[in-house]
Amino acid sequence: MKITNETVYDWGAYVAMNRMVTRATHRGQSIALRVLFAALALLLLFAARFQFTGILQVLLALLGAVILLWTLFLNQLRAFLMVKLIMKGVKVFTNTFDQEGWTVAGVGGGEQRMSYDDIASILEGDRYFILLEDSRRGYILDKRTFAGGGLERFRSLIQSKTKKTIQNV
């Protein structure tokens, strides 16, 4: 019996994927960098307010504001860039899992057959599963849209075929 999943790759899916991958692969490094950049942004804003005048004050304030916004909204920015620049809008992908592997079918009609050996890790969040090939490439699966066996059957199949434990993030 085949398990099917249809997932809309939209902004929300990419934000969730970015958060989950960051938490699973390099959480400590991400937190340290965000703290460092937030401190830098606050230092620039402080310097712009109290140490400089004129155009230098404006440039420091602008740079501080950009760094602070980047620090606070990094996952959302990455998702926006994925949707607008790489994926060129919202896409729907259908994944069909069977005993030998799975097939990914995109909106354009193309299909790609995948092996369970290609999966480096499996992440599970509140709404999505992420099947990672490496720390930069993966497949998003919306937990609400499984057909042909449901979530428990999918969990059992994916763990038995990949020999990997699902990481809850």
Image: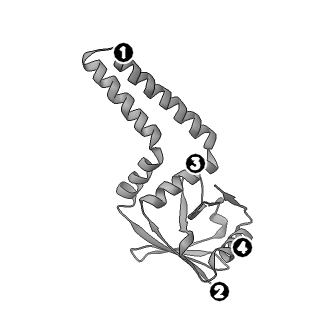
Secondary structure found at label 2: loop
Q: Amino acid at mark 1?
A: Phe
The crowd level at tag 3 (other Cα within 10 Å; few <14, some 14-19, many 20+) is some
Q: Residue furthest bottom?
A: 1
Q: Amino acid at mark 3?
A: Thr
What residue is shown at x 55% (from left), y 68% (from top)? 141
Q: Which numbered disc flags the more N-terminal residue, 4 or 1? A: 1
Q: Which numbered disc flags the more N-terminal residue, 1 or 3? A: 3
Identify the disc placed on residue 1. 2
Secondary structure found at label 4: helix
> Residue tagged by mark 4?
156
Secondary structure found at label 3: helix
Q: Which numbered disc flags the more N-terminal residue, 4 or 2? A: 2
Whether residue 87 is situated above or below residue 143 in the rendered picture: above
Q: Amino acid at mark 2?
A: Met
Q: Which numbered disc flags the more N-terminal residue, 4 or 3? A: 3
Please say which color scheme the image uses. one colour
Secondary structure found at label 1: helix
Badge 3 vs badge 2, beta-carbon distance below 8 Å: no
Whether residue 10 is situated above or below residue 66 in the rendered picture: below
